[in-house]
Image (tube, helix red, strand yellow):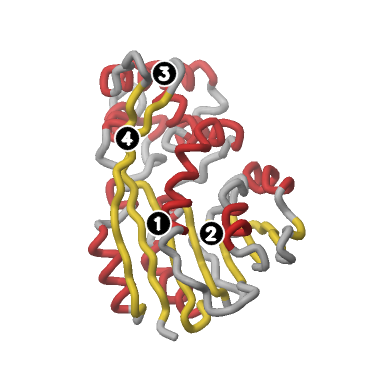
């Protein structure tokens, strides 16, 4: 699957809904083994959620990793010393090949692993890089079967678009069932593994807000591959918009986008 070009401003248009799951994830992370802690944020995006790590562990040295130059450029406003004596920095990394360069007390990832084919295979090396008693925690969307994605795949598979956008979208197996993650983490020796799901009923405002949401994430691969053909890009977006209007009708109070997410918190034996 080709790499998507990301638009930080578009992604942040729904920042409140996108950051809430990360706060819910951090609420379940136990005390870290060292103070000051060393933390890695995998797929940090524009850095706005990485800041939450510094608020929770103000003395920690935190590094956010991402492979998008556009996202990393946006992180510059957050980089530097923190008020608690810690530090925030950011670096380029491809999570499909990233190997931890040092020992961490917490490796965390927010809505990124669904873009990393074969991410289960990286878990052993990532866990090996945790200090005894350290934690690996992540959350990913678990709604690949929702209309948001199903309609996008169906449209991409039509005769008009198949030759243009074939192979660029995430597949149904980009995120595994919760039991798969629990079993893998437990078999890798984590002594405390907590896996759960939460369905958020997100009420979005504005005109075609579900399309606006998708432009920040799910639709990025299509927007990237059609970027050199604005006429085709706009035609695809218009067809997708019409499908979404039927699947997510606007109400007097807004448009409801149900969104299920999968969470995992695994503590390494200490």
**Is residue 269 something one can see in this rendering?**
yes
Residue with the mark numbered 1: 117
Disc with the residue nearer the chain's start (2 vs 3): 2
The answer to whether the residues at label 3 and label 1 have Cβ atoms under 8 Å apart is no
In this view of the protein, can residue 225 be seen by the observer?
no
Report, in whole angstroms, how far the alpha carbon at label 3 lies from the one at label 1.
Answer: 30 Å
Q: Is residue 85 above or below residue 74?
A: below
Q: Sequence-wise, which precedes: disc 4 or disc 2?
A: 2
Judge by depth and name the residue closer to the eye, 36 or 220: 36
In this rendering, the label closer to the viewer, 4 or 3: 4
**Front tag of 3 and 1:** 3
Q: Is residue 31 above or below residue 174?
A: below
Q: Nearer the viewer, mark 4 or mark 2?
A: 4
* Residue at the image position 73 percent from the left and 48 percent from the top: 76
Percent of width and height locating residue 189: 34, 81
Q: Is residue 12 left or right of residue 242?
A: right
Mark 3 falls on what kind of element? loop
CA distance separating discs 1 and 4: 28 Å
Q: Are marks 2 and 3 in contact (CB under 8 Å)?
A: no
């Amino acid at each position: 699957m080709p790499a998507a070009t990301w638009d930080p401003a578009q992604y942040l248009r729904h920042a409140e809904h996108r950051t809430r799951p990360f706060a819910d994830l951090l609420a379940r992370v136990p005390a870290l083994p060292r103070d000051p802690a060393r933390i890695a944020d995998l797929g940090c995006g524009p850095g706005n959620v990485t800041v939450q790590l510094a608020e929770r562990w103000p003395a920690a040295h935190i590094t956010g990793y991402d492979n998008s130059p556009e996202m990393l450029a946006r992180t510059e406003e957050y980089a530097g010393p923190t008020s608690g004596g810690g530090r925030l920095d950011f670096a380029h990394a491809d999570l499909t090949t990233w190997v931890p360069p040092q020992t961490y007390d917490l490796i965390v990832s927010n809505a990124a692993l669904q873009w990393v084919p074969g991410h289960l295979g990286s878990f052993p090396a990532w866990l090996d890089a945790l200090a005894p008693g350290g934690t690996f925690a992540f959350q990913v969307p678990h709604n690949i079967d929702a209309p948001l994605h199903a309609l996008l795949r169906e449209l991409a598979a039509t005769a008009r678009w198949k030759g243009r956008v074939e192979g660029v979208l995430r597949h149904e197996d980009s995120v595994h069932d919760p039991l798969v993650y629990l079993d893998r983490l437990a078999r890798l020796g984590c002594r405390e593994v907590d896996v759960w799901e939460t369905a958020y009923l997100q009420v979005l405002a504005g005109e075609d807000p579900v399309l606006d949401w998708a432009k920040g994430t799910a639709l990025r691969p299509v927007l990237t591959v059609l970027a050199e053909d604005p006429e085709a890009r706009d035609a695809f977006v218009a067809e997708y918009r019409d499908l979404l209007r039927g699947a997510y009708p606007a109400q007097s109070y807004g448009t409801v986008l149900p969104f299920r997410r999968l969470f995992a918190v695994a503590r390494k034996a200490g």
